[in-house]
């Protein structure tokens, strides 16, 4: 066994996006592609000798091969120890949990989250820092700069490690420890939530359906919900992780989790439905014939957080990404705690969480989490809801309805125009930017524009500035239209249009969402000229 230095050349386009470097599997299968990126990570980190690294992925196609390469490269760089999930599998929240619990210097997550997997699907790689969260932009940009100048990488020529067997082996001087994928994470959940109360809930005949979407969270949900909490077996559906997620799109929203939505719409539907995504960090919450928007889920959890033992002391603050609805701001105001508005991307919450300024965070893109780790956490949100349902004895619909009655309802929807031509999408955004000044104060029929801008964020902790984070048109009554281009797609561009309308009157809280938003939808189309720039008369996905 020896360490090899391999000559390579920069490969263009290795710039991490909203959540790491995501490309087609076939791109990652090119010679030196993964190695170049991993070497650039290690070069950016500097001296890693004697440190601990965590490695795991969502089990998608190419996961095992990639992990073997990373283990051999980590060994060539002198890590003292690498903790790797059994079978190469760790959910994204579990990676964050393991990094923090074991005091690791960082971790590598292999995932393309909710993007489809399989030989023709997507793959991805992301570096997380010692706090357990995604590396900040300063690091990801330095990694990118390094990929552009790379001439060689170092890798051990050791044989593959058996990832199925728990225990320790060595590559060069590095200990490779294959750990149980679920244990550390399950222990943390048990500290945060009232498992006794939830066990009683299930004992009393409460029925739930958790859709693992043939992705990573199945084993976690089975071990915790069916195992520790005593839900009947069969509560978790699609609980076996598959390399191609069964050919489906493991994104927990009403469109892609159609099976769950159908189950929850039946007359004999279970009391509670939930789903998680490819790598286990997203969640969708569903009641009987009733979907909860991620923005409302954050607000409801925030308003009721003290029911859970881990949050009994109350919240320090609530953070949400800019396009997420303002429902949680109202809760923060009522609780007398600060609310923060950050750019899209979980990494922007890291500083606020580390500084103890925020306890709960959420994004409209089906992401919710807290300061227990530094990633959003799908199963955590589901357990939080279970704790809330157990503590109140109310249904999902009752809880949300009562929340609206108290705080008002922020009607909310996101319209996605997927895989449109990049050129047209960029031109649409540029032309909107030019229009911003003229929109100020504009009378748009039912709405008058209060202000319109391109969202810019100054991190309150480290002062770093992120520009061009989405165009907002904010109306005088707080309703909003936001335009952004997705930072996670792998094909062309995806235009996201976020629509939000506040309604205080409880008599008007039960309109169909698209109907409630129809005037804003029309304004969005007209102001941005969506069809003209994208050639699309309607969105591909509406959530
Ligand atoms: C990932 C990130 C989230 C982000 C979401 C949507 O899940 O972790 O923080 O909100 O992608 O990002 P996009 O740029 O595609 O809107
Ligand atoms: Zn994800």
Image (tube, rainbow, N blue to C red):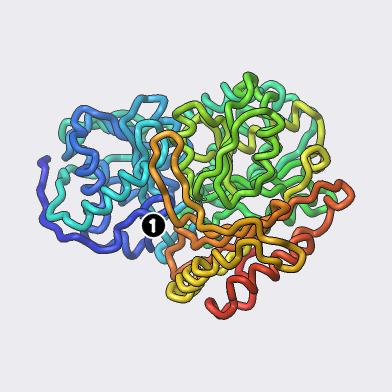
Dot 1 lies on which element? strand
**How far from the left and from the top, in percent, is residue 27?**
32, 64
**Residue shown at 81%/47% (left/top)?**
504
The quadrant in which the C terminus is found is bottom right
Against 171, is 501 above or below?
A: below
Against 59, is 407 above or below?
A: above
**Residue shown at 40%/63% (left/top)?**
119
Against 294, is 522 above or below?
A: below
Say whether residue 145 is visible: yes
Front residue (pair 300, 265): 300
Residue density around tag 1, few if under 14, some if 14–19, many if 20 or more, within 10 Å:
many
Q: Quadrant of residue 166?
A: top left
Front residue (pair 171, 18): 18
**How far from the left and from the top, in percent, is residue 41?**
26, 45
Location of mark 1 (residue): 22
Say whether residue 72 is visible: no
In the displayed structure image, the side of residue 500 where residue 111 appears, left or right: left
**Residue shown at 78%/60% (left/top)?**
516
In the displayed structure image, the side of residue 191 where residue 132 appears, left or right: left
**How far from the left and from the top, in percent, is residue 369?**
56, 37
**How far from the left and from the top, in percent, is residue 392?**
79, 28
Mark 1 vs ligand 1: CB under 8 Å? no
**Residue shown at 15%/60% (left/top)?**
9
In the displayed structure image, the side of residue 495 where residue 264 appears, left or right: right
Number of numbered markers: 1
Against 82, is 285 above or below?
A: below
The quadrant in which the N terminus is found is top left
């Amino acid at each position: 066994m020896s360490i090899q230095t391999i000559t390579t050349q920069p490969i263009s386009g290795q710039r991490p996006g909203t959540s790491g470097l995501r490309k087609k599997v076939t791109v990652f299968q090119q010679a030196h592609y993964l190695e170049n990126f991993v070497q650039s990570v290690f070069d950016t980190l500097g001296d890693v000798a004697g440190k601990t690294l965590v490695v795991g992925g969502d089990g998608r196609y190419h996961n095992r091969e990639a992990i073997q390469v990373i283990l051999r490269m980590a060994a060539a760089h002198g890590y003292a120890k690498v903790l790797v999930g059994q079978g190469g599998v760790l959910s994204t929240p579990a990676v964050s949990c393991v990094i923090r619990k074991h005091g690791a210097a960082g971790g590598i997550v292999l995932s393309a989250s909710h993007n489809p997997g399989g030989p023709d699907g997507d793959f991805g790689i992301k570096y997380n820092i010692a706090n357990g969260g995604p590396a900040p932009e300063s690091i990801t940009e330095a990694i990118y700069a390094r990929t552009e100048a790379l001439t060689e990488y170092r890798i051990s020529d050791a044989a593959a490690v058996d990832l199925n067997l728990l225990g320790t082996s060595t590559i060069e001087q590095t200990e490779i420890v294959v750990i149980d994928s679920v244990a550390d994470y399950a222990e943390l959940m048990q500290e945060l939530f009232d498992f006794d109360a939830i066990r009683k809930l299930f004992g009393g005949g409460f029925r739930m359906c958790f859709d693992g979407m043939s992705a990573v969270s199945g084993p976690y949900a089975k071990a915790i919900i069916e195992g520790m909490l005593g839900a009947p077996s069969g509560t978790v559906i699609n609980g076996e992780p598959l390399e191609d997620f069964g050919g489906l799109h493991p994104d927990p929203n009403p469109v892609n989790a159609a099976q769950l939505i159908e189950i929850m719409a039946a007359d004999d539907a279970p009391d509670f439905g939930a789903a998680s995504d490819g790598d286990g960090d997203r969640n969708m919450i569903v009641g009987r014939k009733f979907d909860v928007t991620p923005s409302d889920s954050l607000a409801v959890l925030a308003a009721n957080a003290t029911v859970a033992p881990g949050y009994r002391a109350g919240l320090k603050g609530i953070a949400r990404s800019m396009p997420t609805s303002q429902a949680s701001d109202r809760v923060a105001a009522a609780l007398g705690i600060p609310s923060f508005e950050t750019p899209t991307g979980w990494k922007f919450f890291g500083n606020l969480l580390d500084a103890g300024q925020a306890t709960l965070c959420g994004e409209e893109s089906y992401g919710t989490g807290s300061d227990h780790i530094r990633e959003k956490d799908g199963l955590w949100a589901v357990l939080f809801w279970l704790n809330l349902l157990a503590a109140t004895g109310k249904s999902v619909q009752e809880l949300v309805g009562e929340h609206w009655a108290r705080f008002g309802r922020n009607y909310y929807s996101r319209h996605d125009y997927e895989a449109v031509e990049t050129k047209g999408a960029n031109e649409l955004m540029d032309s909107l930017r030019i229009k911003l000044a003229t929109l100020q104060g504009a009378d748009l029929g039912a709405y008058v524009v209060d202000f319109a801008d391109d969202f810019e964020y100054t991190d309150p902790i480290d002062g770093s500035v992120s520009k061009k984070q989405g165009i907002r048109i904010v109306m005088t009554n707080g309703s909003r239209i936001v335009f952004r281009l997705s930072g996670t797609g792998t094909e062309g561009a995806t235009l996201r249009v976020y629509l939000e309308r506040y309604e205080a009157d409880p008599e008007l809280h039960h309109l169909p969402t698209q109907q409630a938003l129809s005037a804003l939808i029309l304004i969005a189309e007209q102001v941005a000229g969506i069809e003209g720039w994208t050639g699309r008369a309607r969105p591909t996905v509406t959530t």
